[in-house]
Each structure stands twice: as C-alpha cells, then as structure tokens.
Image (cartoon, helix red, strand yellow):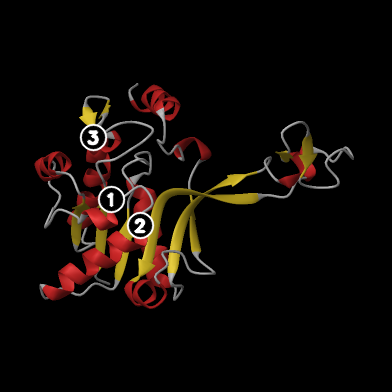
Amino acid sequence: MNILVIIPARCGSKGIPFKNIIDLCGQPLISYSISQGLQLKKNKLVAEVMVSTDCDEIAQVAKKYGASVPYIRPSEISADKSKSIDLILHALDYYLKHGTKFDAVLLLQPTSPLRSENVLQQAIETFKENSNNSLISVYKEDYINDLVMYGFDGKTLFPKNINHNTGIRRQDHSTNYVRNGAIYLTRVDFLIKHSKIISDNPLMIEMKKSDSINIDNYDDLIMMRRIKCK
C-alpha cells in the first residue's frame, strides 16, 4: 500500500503564535511528527513524508528535519476556518499531477507528539489487514459521559441525561472511546469521493489517555513539557 504522510502546519494559531514550531524540549514541536513519519518511511511502511504549510519559516524548519515541502500551501486553504480535507485533497492533486498516486493518507498533526512508533506501526498494519475506509486513534474514557455532563442556560445547569442524579455508580458508566486527533489514516478513493477524513465505521487504534494530549493552548503546552521534557 502506497501511503502518503501529511503533516499540516499553517502559520496562524490563535492559542499559541507559531505553535507548530514552538520549542518543546529543545526542538520545534513539528520535528517530533516529522521524525515519526521518517521512521515509518525507513521501515517501508509509508512512501513519502511531506509538510503542508503556508509559511516559509515553517517550511525551512520542516526541511531541516528531513520532511519534503514541495510547495507553499495557498492562502485560500490556510485560513482559520479551512478544513484539513482541503489541504489533503490539494496535496493529492499536486502529487498526481507530478506522476505519483497514493492509496492512503496518514495525517499526523504536529500538536500530538506523544504517539509512539509502535502505535503508528500497529495502526498501519491494522488498516492494511482490513477493508475499512479509515482508522482513527482513540483513548478509552470510563468516566465522562452524559450522566456527568451539563449544559448552562446563563443561570443554572441543566442535565444532559435525566438519570444524572439517580446515584449510578462510576463503575456502571458506559465506556466511551474518544478521538484524540493523533492519527488519521484514510483511503484515497474515499477521500476524493466523499471529501471526508473519517468514514462512518472507522477502525481504531487505542492510545493511553496520558499520551493523548493535543496542544491547543498554553496550558496544554505546559502539561506536555512536564511529560515530554523529563
């Protein structure tokens, strides 16, 4: 299976300016995802590792750490409200025009650097062994569900579940699997046909909850540094 690794990294970030290349334990954040992708390529599990960015500075950092940056992403698919599917389809179209066709895309967001090489390899092997159109990474959540969730009307809370106050034990809560954003693996035919990254019945690869931090703001970055920079 010919797999393209895409690492998305645009300039803009409201939470943390230039988040994708911010320092994490002496290295730019994006370098960890690049390293993971290049190890997969070394092990012949993927064919190419590229960074899709609209920023010259990020492009230079990505190239320094060994990723391919074949172009600077157009501004019209790099705005705050732009979707990941747009940059994926743009990348696939670029490679197809240059004579390379891929079977699947592995999207690695720079903000999830705690995914392990072992988990990535398992994800690819699981995907290859099945016919599902997509695979996502998740963590198991035994506590959080609608029994402990409330909305707010501006004055008081209102329960999401009518049984919120009936004394159901934590042990009796249903188990949920929460998408953590670390791994998205999707067949190209599905991407092009449906313009979606996740199919209705995706495969899953389970990660630890402690490895599922996605850096969105400074609190996340502080927590990540405490874990990663030991």
In which quarter of the view is residue 47 placed? bottom left
The N terminus - image quarter: bottom left
Q: Horizontal and vertical percent for residue 86? A: 32, 62
| Residue 45 is at least partly visible in this image | no
Q: Secondary structure at mark 1?
A: strand
| Mark 2, other Cα within 10 Å: few <14 / some 14–19 / many ≥20 | some
Secondary structure of residue under mark 3: helix
Place residue 60 in its image quadrant: top left
First in residue order: circle 2 vs circle 1: 1
In this rendering, the answer to whether 166 lies above or below 121 is above
Label 3 vs 2, first from the N-terminus: 3
CB under 8 Å between discs 2 and 1 = yes
Residue type at mark 3 is Ile
**Any mark on residue 8, and which?**
1
Mark 1 to mark 3 CA distance (whole Å): 12 Å
Residue found 20% across the figure and 56% down from its top: 74
Q: CA distance from mark 2 to mark 1?
A: 8 Å
